[in-house]
Image (cartoon, helix red, strand yellow):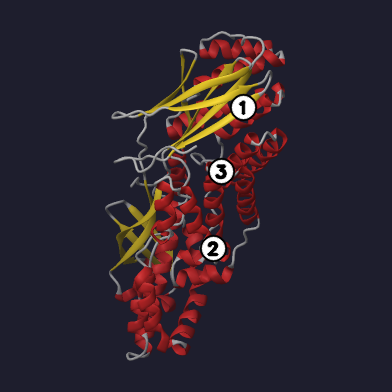
Amino acid sequence: MQLYTRELHLVNIRQAYNQYSNTTMKLLQIYCQSIKPLLWLVVVSLGLSSCMSYYQTRYAFHKNFENGNLPAAEQALLKDKKGPRRNTKLLYYLNLGTVNSIMGNYARSNEYFEQAHRIGENYRVNYLKEAASFLVNPMVTEYKGEDFELLMIHYYKALNFLKMGDKEAALVECKRMNIKLNALGTKYKNIEGKYHKDAFVHNLMGIIYEANHDYNNAFIAYRNAVNIYQGTYKKMFGLGVPDQLKKDIIRAAHLTGFKEEKARYEEMFGQRYQPLPKGGGDLVFFWHNGLGPIKAEWSINFNILRGEGGNVTFKNDQYGWSFPFFVDNDRYQNSGLEQMEFIRVTFPKYILRSPLYQGATLHWNNQTFSLEQAENVSKLALKSLEQRMLYEVGKSLLRLALKKGSEYALRHQDKNAGAAILSAFNAVTEKADTRAWQSVPHSIYYTRIHLPEGKQSIKFTPQSSSQSKAYNFSFDIKRGQTYFHTFHSLDTQPGGMASGVR
């Protein structure tokens, strides 16, 4: 697990403490006074599932998906009649959209993704559930999605529209992506090291603009992509400008008549503009390689130190973390914190799933074209979690401190009351938020081939250190048209779990 910065977020933690501590105490009193006889039943039932991550609670879906049994994966989702109403309804629609996209049900896939988009757009904080999350755990709140997950909705929708031949609708999805990227830019304005620019999204926008013969906008989008690959992506993810993008931006500059820009990029990339053969059309082939990470949980101990001026510090020397809370004397003495020396806290983490294949090529007419990585979705997921890790740590500490303090306060009031039950309740309900869109690919590769008119046979070959497979495709190329195709290899290490699925 990557270690994170040691900055302190005193203001946020103080605000959160003041906002939720009183509410939580009232909820605890209601629980223990009115439904105490039922608490043991709650404890027992929660204990059966509290150790399970979101991945494990949806095991039937994920297992069938990883094995390439997509109809069974879809049925596993549809059998959950409460799926569209649960706190995880966003993930319900994201997974349905993904499965149907891979199965070739593009229109149905887009209906599901549109539902997911609306849920993301209409998300509003439910303050009662937020307060309850400090009583139980963050899984009681509605899942609102990671920034990159909300962007990928439009990536999938755009691809679906392109495969249905609707380039205008695909452009609408590009514009939606651009709006969300601008919002992220505002959200993280002047904050270094935050993910708020996506090179692949701009690259995709350029590809779609070019497919619509809008070379001016294609050039602008390609230029934005190049800038982000050379800056943020190189630094954050070690991912530079794909060779295909270098060719595309030089060609777009030429077709737009931007002579100076064309010369600039030719010099920058050390290559000259190569005119394409007249006639024919383009094939843009996207390869979704492997599977994205699984979100799980981990836990560490914090020492509790009482300082001067009402500060209580939660400290972990192993990771060098120190989180001070401000607690006045009356609240401190009544909370029971003075009776505690340490506290154990759970946090979310990602477990990476390494793809089986390290590369892939397309073969046509005795020519070989390598597919290049344009987006590392797994690294995006890690970055998104890293960006809010300090907030997660502070929130988890606050939640557990309140729960432990409440146990002590209740035990102090009535030694025979529900303190023991509450202690067990707190123990079995303590968990991190492990919800995530786990059917996304590990990484996305692509390339472009210019093909002559007529039927053309293409062989796609993903390669690993131990094996390679070949898949044959046929495309009926028409003059001036761009064709889009995707292939998802679900295999992961060790022992690839599934065959590639179109």
Q: Nearer the viewer, residue 160 or 269?
A: 160
User: Who's the residue at 33% across and 47% down the image?
Assistant: 1
Question: Mark 2 = which residue?
Answer: 83
- The answer to whether the residue labelled 3 contacts the one labelled 2, judged by CB atoms less than 8 Å apart, is no
- For the point 67% across and 42% down, the residue is 176
Amino acid type at image mark 1: Tyr
Residue 217 versus residue 439 in the image, above or below: above
Q: Nearer the viewer, mark 3 or mark 2?
A: 3
Identify the residue position indicated by label 3 in the image.
Answer: 101
Along the viewing direction, whichever of 111 and 9 lies nearer the viewer = 111
Q: Assign a secondary structure to mark 3.
A: helix
**How many other residues sit within 10 Å of disc 3, few (<14), some (14-19) or many (≥20)?**
many
Residue 351 percent location from the top left of the image: 36, 48
Please state the horizontal and vertical placement of residue 139, each as a whole percent of the image: 47, 64
CA–CA distance in space, label 1 to label 2: 35 Å
Q: Assign a secondary structure to mark 1.
A: strand
Residue 34, position as x, y percentages in the image: 48, 89
Could you tell me which residue is drawn at 46 percent across and 83 percent down?
Answer: 31
